[in-house]
Amino acid sequence: MTILLTGAAGYIGSHTAVALAEAGYDVAIVDDFSNSSPEAVRRCEALTGKKMPLYEADVADKAAMARIFAETKPAAVIHFAGHKAVGESVAKPLKYYRNNLDTTLSLLECMADAGCKRFIFSSSATVYGAKAAVPYTEESETGGCTNPYGWTKFMIEQIAGGVAKADPAMSVVLLRYFNPVGAHPSGRIGENPSGIPNNLMPYITQVAVGRLPHLNVFGDDYDTPDGTGVRDYIHVVDLAAGHVKALEYALSHTGTEVFNLGTGHGVSVLELVHAFEAATGVKVPYVIAPRRPGDLASVYADCSKAKRVLGWKAEKTVQDMCADSWRWQSNNPNGY
Ligand code: UFG
């Protein structure tokens, strides 16, 4: 059975490709490499010993996608492709709305044309915006997003939900990721941000490897135990396993379901820095900097629904996240 993954040369998609191949699925990938490298897919093939047909195309290109659907005949689609830099989305809102919405609309149209009824989407905890109280459950209020990137996730959830409502044979699973970190324990695939990283863990590893001089800790006066921001960091290998469970669910159900994928535990910026130092023996110099606009004090998940319905929960520790991120970064100091 073939599963078509969009954007799977990227960070979460590549780890999911490995997990799906190991679970016995055939994986086909479409990616335009606008923010990723085909080398990631070659390494996924090497890790699993399975071929993963790789199509270079823009997901918004319906003619190209129609050919890919005809060739691969996927039983399901997992849609990772999309722009994801929060700050850039504030500066270039149209780029984000155009790309993230266009690709998804075209993809859903191609799926309808091809009779493919299973759609799994990379959503984000960002859809909870600033409205709900932590821990977020899937019933927490969404909307009130603080940036266009977040709004694209929110809008795509509405669009996919509407498609499932209109077609009773359709299955849509919306996965709200918290903060993915870590890398495959082999150190062969991992997160490879272009330019200076926006996110905390890749920033830490680039300081540790000597590419950046120090970490800026964005605010130490939040209402949290040590004053720094608290997030629910989840190991990308656990997250990938969550996709395999979500796929099994999508293959045997119809309608729309939403799942939080996190650990349920909040970790502060300084706790993560100290955990990284303890796991790797490498010092991470930091300075306290002003708060970053749009950041919330504390974001973490209630993941009981994923455990109850999917039989999934995160297994890996913060130490695993740090050690595996470091293995990837130190083995690949310049990425792919
Ligand atoms: N932080 C720093 N210094 C840095 C980078 C981050 O102190 O150089 C802090 C932030 O202030 C925050 C924490 O580290 O407290 C995590 O920040 P990230 O940028 O790693 O992650 P965010 O929680 O801001 O955003 C992430 C994803 C988004 C997603 C959001 C959902 O990057 O795509 O989670 O809640 F929308």
Image (cartoon, grey):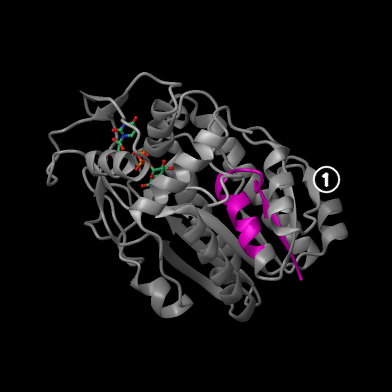
Horizontal relation, residue 111 to residue 125: left or right: right
Q: Which residues are magenta?
A: 1-20
The C terminus, quarter of image? top right
Residue beneath the point at 16% across and 33% down: 220
Question: In the rendered image, is residue 131 in sight?
Answer: no
Q: Position of residue 305 (x, y in %)?
A: 38, 73
Horizontal relation, residue 168 to residue 30: left or right: left
Horizontal relation, residue 190 to residue 285: left or right: right
Horizontal relation, residue 118 to residue 308: left or right: right
Residue 254's place in the image compared with 336, above or below, is below
Question: Closest to the observer: 272 or 208?
Answer: 208
Residue 150's place in the image compared with 121, above or below, is above
Residue beneath the point at 28% across and 50% down: 299
Where residue 133 sits, quadrant-wise, is bottom left
Where residue 177 sits, quadrant-wise, is bottom left
Count the labels in the image: 1
Q: Residue furthest top?
A: 213
Q: Which residue is mark 1?
A: 64
